[in-house]
Amino acid sequence: SRVLDNAGSDDERVVEAALRPRRLAEFPGQPRVRDQLDLVLQAAKGRGAAPDHILLSGPPGLGKTTLAMIVAAELERPIRVTSGPAIQHAGDLAAVLSSLDEGEVLFLDEIHRMARAAEEMLYLAMEDFRVDVIVGKGPGATAIPLELPPFTVVGATTRDGLLPAPLRDRFGFTGRLDFYDPADLALILRRSASLLGVEIDHDAVVEIAGRSRGTPRIANRLLRRVRDWAQIHGDGRIDHAAAAAALELFDVDPVGLDRLDRAVLEALCRKYAGGPVGITTLAVAVGEEPDTVETVAEPYLVRQGFLERTPRGRLARPAAWAHLGLTPPASSTA
Ligand code: ADP
């Protein structure tokens, strides 16, 4: 099931980096976010100033990191990359902030997972371009203000609802990324195939795009597995038959649901008769953290009409029963 899991291996990160679009004009999909970003960046460049801080939110694999790199490229500035989980103490953040160059882009991935104490330091740095460095301990400790050059934070989060309001308010612009439609995924697949030097026909592109869960990272991953199949079983060219055979071999659901998506639907329908069931209970049933179920699986299931979030808990929609080939219980509200 690796083929659909969301966390990538090191090898995958290398390939992913090679497949990232470098400029806004080469970035397919997300037309709204792209236009908004284009405006923000062009205006800032025109003024010769660092743009407002930018927050990017949305499920994993939709292009937040890619867009952060693009922001730096469009501004022709260097980028410093770190993430919330890497910042466990205010000191970790102080070290990063105090070494930024003027106009540098600071990419903070998973910003909602940063330590509380660091968050407060970040507010001040984002607003006043200053950090207070605490020297000494106990009653004799003093705060020495340190001026920072102007810089731009690009924050990424899968959960903008979890960001404390004061932090959210310090971003002048929030771009919300949504799942890609099949036409955009097809563009991405063609571009990736050409970068990987593989020939792929129209029907194969359509087949893979339709099974990629609206997610470029998954589209690229499936493309690489189909490429493997075509290399071993054919002449390396990818046609519809190769795509269909490879996707079947790797157990990719006809609508692109992955292992976790299916496990959630199965548990919801088989164990809890379609719900409503609380997120924590559901997560335990599939052996995952509630946060993973909420950020990785649910957004796509909701978007595809398989699952509904209600105040009483998660509810299976009729499409979920149909997809699993099950009959909803007579008393089901779904
Ligand atoms: P996120 O940070 O949101 O998890 P990434 O920016 O790391 O997602 O994107 C995952 C992979 O998907 C990237 O390596 C890139 O190759 C690909 N990708 C994402 N968005 C696009 C896009 N719009 N066009 C082409 N490839 C994309």
Image (cartoon, rainbow, N blue to C red):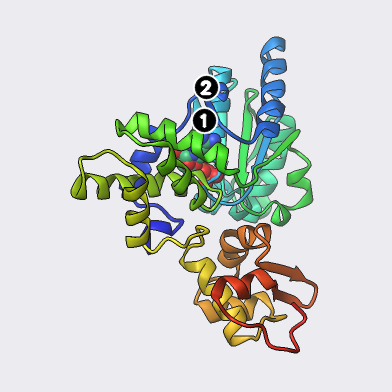
Question: Residue 177 location, x and y as percent?
Answer: 65, 43
Give me the residue at 65% from left, 66% from top. Answer: 306
**Does the beta carbon at disc 2 come under 8 Å from ligand 1?**
no
Residue, x 59% and y 48% (percent of image)?
90
Expressed as whole percent of the image width and height from the top left, the position of residue 23 reads 52, 23
Q: Residue at label 1?
A: 69
Q: Quadrant of the C terminus?
A: bottom right
Q: Amino acid at mark 2?
A: Ala
Q: Pointer 2: residues within 10 angstroms few (<14), some, or many (20+)?
A: some
Q: Are marks 1 and 2 in contact (CB under 8 Å)?
A: yes
**Quarter where residue 175 is shown:** top right
Q: Quadrant of the N terminus?
A: bottom left
Residue 235 percent coordinates (x, y): 20, 40
Which amino acid, mark 1? Met
Look at the numbered disc 1 and say if its residue's Cβ is closer than 8 Å to ligand 1: yes
**Which residue is labeled 2 in the image?**
73
Q: Secondary structure at mark 2?
A: helix
| Picture coordinates of residue 236, whole percent (x, y) | 23, 40
